[in-house]
Amino acid sequence: MERRRTTINLLTVFLFSIILFASASMQKAYGKEEIIAKMTGFKGHLNIMRNEVAIPPVVNLHLLNNDRINVVEGTAEINFDDGSTVVLFTNTEIIIKQDLKKRDLTGVLKRSYTLRFIKIVSGRLWANVIPMEYIITEFETGAGTIQIKRGTVEIAIGFVTGTVSIGCPRGEATVRVLIAGITHEVDLTAGQLTTIIPGTPPTSPVSYTPGTIVPIDPETEKMMMKLLAQPTAIESPPETLEQEPPPTSASPSSL
C-alpha cells in the first residue's frame, strides 16, 4: 500500500511538472506574438519579414516583436498604442523590438518600464514620440543610440559612409555613443542637430532647418504637421521619474 502511494505521488509530481513546462512554453510563445505596433499606411514597394517569412504589406497590419520592415520605394507609417508615430522613407529598413525592463528606485525596489527599441539598419525616418510615464523609446543606428524624451526627431544614415545625422525639430533627445567603454553623450533640443561619424563621439549641437534631413513630400508633410498639432497627454515625465537616472542604452542582444 505504501509503495502504491509513493508511485501515485511520483506520478502526480511528474504530471504537474509537465503542466508547468507546457504553461511556460505557451506563455513564451504568447509573448513573442504580442502586438506592439500597427502599420497604418504605406505607399510604394515594401518588404516585411517575420521570423524569416515574408508578410504581405496591408494597411493596419499588426507588427510583432522583431518584425523587419524595409521600404524599397515610397513611405510607411507605423503607429504605437500610445500615439507615437514613425514614418519610414525610401531605402529605409528597421527592426522593431519591445521589452519589459526594470530600474532601481531605492537600490532595492525596482519599477517596471517598457523599452521600445527600433534598430535602424539603413535609410531615413521621422518620429513623433508622445512622452509616457513608463515607456522609453530608443533608436539604434550602429554608430550610436538616440533616446527620445519627447517631441520629434529626424534620423538619416549615410549609404556610403554610415555617418548618422540626428535632428530634433521639437522636444528633447539624447544621443549616446560608446567608444572603448566610455559613453559620449549629447543632448538635443528643438532646432538642433548632431552628427555621428562611426567610431567618433557625436558632434556638438548646431542649428538646422527641420525637414532637411529626411526627404519630405507634400503629402507626408501635411500628415506630419497634423501629428505635431495634436495635444500630448503628458508633456513631460512625472517629477518622480525626472529624479531617477535614465536606464542605460540597451543593445539588440540584450533584448
Image: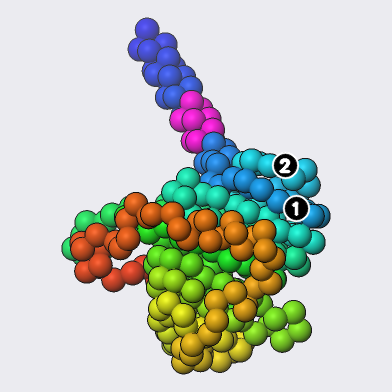
- Left or right of 74 in this view: 187: left
Quarter location, residue 166: bottom right
User: Can residue 251 be seen in the rendering of this structure?
Assistant: no
Q: Which residues are magenta?
A: 18-27
Q: Where residue 42 appears, x then y in whole percent?
A: 71, 51
Asked which secondary structure carries label 1, the reply is strand
Distance between the Cα atoms at labels 1 and 2? 10 Å
Q: Is residue 24 magenta?
A: yes
Q: Crowding near pointer 2: few (<14 within 10 Å), some, many (20+)?
A: few
Q: Is residue 62 magenta?
A: no
Q: Which residue is mark 1?
A: 43
Asked which secondary structure carries label 2, the reply is loop
Q: Where residue 155 appears, x then y in whole percent?
A: 59, 73
Q: Where residue 88 appears, x then y in whole percent?
A: 66, 62
Q: Amino acid at mark 1?
A: Lys
Chain-order first, disc 1 or disc 2: 1
User: Could you say which is closer to the camera, residue 63 or residue 231?
Assistant: 231
192 in relation to 48, above or below: below
Residue at 56% across, 91% down: 200
User: Could you say which is closer to the camera, residue 27 or residue 143?
Assistant: 143
- Left or right of 110 in this view: 178: right
43 in relation to 156, above or below: above
Residue at 34% across, 52% down: 233
Q: Which residue is mark 2?
A: 58
Quarter location, residue 197: bottom right
Residue at 22% across, 56% down: 109
- Left or right of 245 in this view: 143: right
21 in relation to 79, above or below: above
User: Can residue 16 be seen in the rendering of this structure?
Assistant: yes
